[in-house]
Image (cartoon, rainbow, N blue to C red):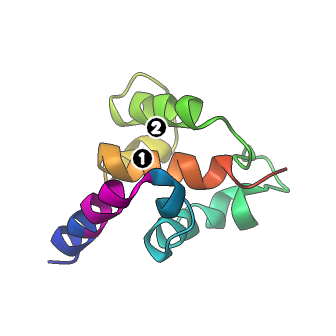
Amino acid sequence: MNRVLASLTVLGLIGVGWVHAQDSPVSRGLAATCTGCHGPAGASSGLVPSINGMEASRMVALLQEFRDGKREATIMHQLAKGYSDAQMQMLAQWFAAQKP
């Protein structure tokens, strides 16, 4: 049920445009799942790469490579399988807006 609600919310946000979706509660919530490893707002202080300010198209491509098993990973391949293409786009837009 939560996945259906999230998908409907994402589709609604697509309808109002990515500019508004970049800092929506949904995009912030999705991004929060990344901060445990990638740091607050994607600014890592450890061995995991920082993703803040990354070009959105690059992040989407990386997430799709993880999801499709084209890029080696310890956990990202499993996490990426849980995101729809629209959610990947939302994550990419949100992190692209977070300046290093």
Tag 2 residue: 63
Residue situated furthest top in the rendering: 70
- In the figure, is residue 73 to the left or right of 8? right
Numbered mark located on residue 88 in the image: 1
Residue situated furthest front in the rendering: 16
Q: Nearer the viewer, residue 2 or 67?
A: 2
Asked if residue 42 is among those painted magenta in the image, a careful observer would answer: no
Q: Please state which amino acid type lies under the numbered disc 2.
A: Leu
Name the residue at 71% across, 56% down: 42
Q: Nearer the viewer, residue 26 or 20?
A: 20
Q: Percent position (x, y) of residue 49?
A: 73, 43
Name the residue at 74% across, 67% down: 40
Mark 2, secondary structure of its residue:
helix
Q: Percent position (x, y) of residue 35?
A: 64, 65
Q: Please state which amino acid type lies under the numbered disc 1.
A: Met
- In the figure, is residue 44 to the left or right of 37? right
Asked if residue 10 is among those painted magenta in the image, a careful observer would answer: yes
Query: Over which residues does the magenta segment extend?
Result: 9-17
Name the residue at 57% across, 67% down: 23
Q: Percent position (x, y) of residue 51?
A: 69, 46
